Image (tube, helix red, strand yellow):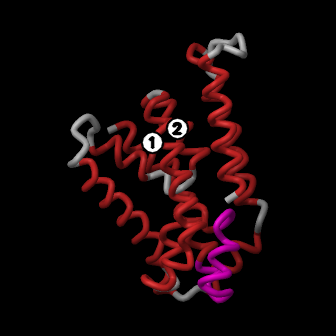
Amino acid sequence: MKGSFIIVSFFALGTVFGIYHVIPYDFSESKLSYYTLCVLMFCVGLSVGNDPNTLKSFKTLNPRLILLPVMTILGTLAGCAVVSLFLEHRNPADVMALGAGFGYYSLSSIFITEYKGAELGTIALLSNITREIIALLCAPLLVKYFGKLAPISVGGATTMDTTLPIITRYSGKEYVVVSIFHGFIVDFSVPFLVTLFCLI
């Protein structure tokens, strides 16, 4: 949770710097966000390819639990589609692009800013950070009322890193591999789904 607050603090600081033009540089006219995105995608690929133990651990996974990330993705997108019906100023594709971040705020917000502008990118950042914070703070309640898989589904793409310790604590150590697999698959889907909905 500390990491989420650090991210929000940097976002708030950047907003203040932008309003008062503390840094004399026109970011709106530059390709800096695009280059940042390229570096971020390289780092994501590096982290996935650099951890062979994660890929090996998937072999011990119960075949039925392979459906969990699929249901997380479908459930999130279905929920976004329903919510879009109540947001007259936003089309369903925009709302589904926001949801397709699945808690991966750093990557999805840059993608959405690149395709849809800073306003929607900011909403993506805040909504995805909120998803992570809910997973971190509400894990005990989610386990109590919805079962041990609930915090994994709520955590989205974060279940292989930031929310893994809290999931391990409340769901149990037997769900570590499930959580890592879930986070890996959902994480992998983010750039494809966000781009798809931004282009619709």
What's the distance in space between the residues labelled 2 and 1, CA to CA? 7 Å
Mark 1 secondary-structure assignment: helix
User: In this figure, which residue is indicated by the disc labeled 1?
Assistant: 195
**Crowd class of label 1 (few under 14; some 14 to 19; many from 20; radius 10 Å):** some
> Which label's residue is closer to the chain start, 2 or 1?
2
**Crowd class of label 2 (few under 14; some 14 to 19; many from 20; radius 10 Å):** many
Mark 2 secondary-structure assignment: helix
**How far across and how far down the image is residue 66, in percent?**
49, 78
Q: Residue at x 36, y 64 (%)?
A: 74
Three-letter code for the amino acid on which mark 1 is drawn: Thr
User: In this figure, which residue is indicated by the disc labeled 2?
Assistant: 111
Q: Residue at x 48, y 77 (%)?
A: 150
Nearest the camera: 6 or 50? 6
Assess whether residue 170 is covered by the magenta stretch.
Answer: yes
The numbered disc on residue 186 is none
Does residue 128 appear left or right of residue 87 in this picture?
right
Nearest the camera: 105 or 58? 105
Q: Residue at x 67, y 33 (%)?
A: 36
Assess whether residue 21 is covered by the magenta stretch.
Answer: no
**How far across and how far down the image is residue 174, in percent?**
64, 89
**How far across and how far down the image is residue 167, in percent?**
62, 76
Looking at the figure, which quarter contains the N terminus?
bottom right
Above or below 116: residue 174: below
Does residue 178 appear left or right of residue 36 in this picture?
left
Q: Quadrant of residue 13?
A: top right
Nearest the camera: 20 or 198? 20
**How far across and how far down the image is residue 153, in percent?**
48, 71
The reply to whether the C-beta atoms of the residues labelled 2 and 1 are less than 8 Å apart is yes
**Range of magenta residues:** 160-178
